[in-house]
Amino acid sequence: MATTTDLKSLLNSPLSSYSAVIDNLAAGDTSGLFNLTKAALVLGNFYNDAPVLSGLADTNITTDQNLELKFSEPVTAITGDIIVCDSANKVVATVPVTDKAVTGSGSSLITVDLPNDLAAGEYCVKVDVGAFQDADLRDYTSTDVINFTVSAAGTGGETGTGETNDVSLDTLGSATDPVTLDETGAFNFTDNAADAKGNNVIITEFGADDSITITGATAEQYDDGVIGSNEAGDVSITFNNDGILHQITLTGVAAGAGLVFDVNSFNALPVGDLIFS
């Protein structure tokens, strides 16, 4: 077979890309195996998964704050409702996905401006089956419910101040002696991947208000075996700069989210993003 492909990039490709790869494999296969495989994959819709609701951008919001729903991939609004219930499972808001109060169609982040501010308390949000589709026309089919908390204006979120603190990870820790950061609040952590001293940092409270900005390297370099996750949901980011290791571990951020292996799958998590500058 003359055709090879990068499987990591293939996992994030649309259905047409999978079909093209299998077409190429089938063309060089005299046994007919890949033609049969292609038919089975098409019939089984095995190319990749339907979109899922991976969480909220912030699960602790204020009474005057919008809901931000994070999907596993870009989705388009079709028909159906976004439903919010209180702690007694009483419906307190129903917003059609095609309403002007719902924005972000075509992206993985859907913002919902609720018709009325919610009172402080515990809530959950769910999305009707079929309310969204991905680029390959696969319907959203999950019945998952995402819980969130509403606090009085000025007290919600991780900071309550609206301020973001910049923290450099450069030179913190060593290969045998990591530094643990147990931070609360909104933080933009920075790491210069070209720094000659490296680092080894464990961050235990990385949330939706936080982010990591990488300088001295590109997103493509970080897609090449740099990012990984384990069964506990910890994500490790280990960049090797000519033998100098830059190691960042984020505990629990991928719990229940499946495999995290590149920048796109990390940025689909319900936490802050990995940014390259």
Image (cartoon, grey):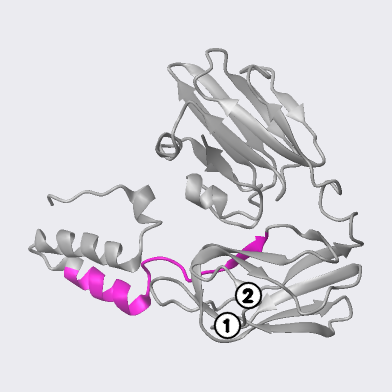
Q: Are marks 1 and 2 in contact (CB under 8 Å)?
A: yes
The residue lying toward the viewer, choosing from 126 and 214, is 214
Residue highlighted by disc 1: 98
Q: Position of residue 39 (x, y in %)?
A: 24, 75
Local crowd size for mark 1, using a 10 Å CA cut-off: few (<14), some (14–19), many (≥20): some
Above or below — where is 248 with respect to 174?
below
The residue lying toward the viewer, choosing from 32 and 62, is 62
The residue lying toward the viewer, choosing from 245 and 62, is 62
Q: Secondary structure at mark 2?
A: strand
Label 1 is placed on what type of residue?
Thr
Q: Is residue 37 magenta?
A: yes
Q: Secondary structure at mark 1?
A: loop
Label 2 is placed on what type of residue?
Val
Give residue 90's mark.
none
Looking at the image, which residue is at 69% across and 41% down? Answer: 251
Q: Position of residue 12 (x, y in %)?
A: 40, 56
Question: Picture quarter containing residue 63?
Answer: bottom right
Looking at the image, which residue is at 52% across and 24% down? Answer: 193
Looking at the image, which residue is at 76% across and 80% down? Answer: 115
Residue highlighted by disc 2: 102
Magenta region, residue range? 35-56
Res 13 seen here: yes
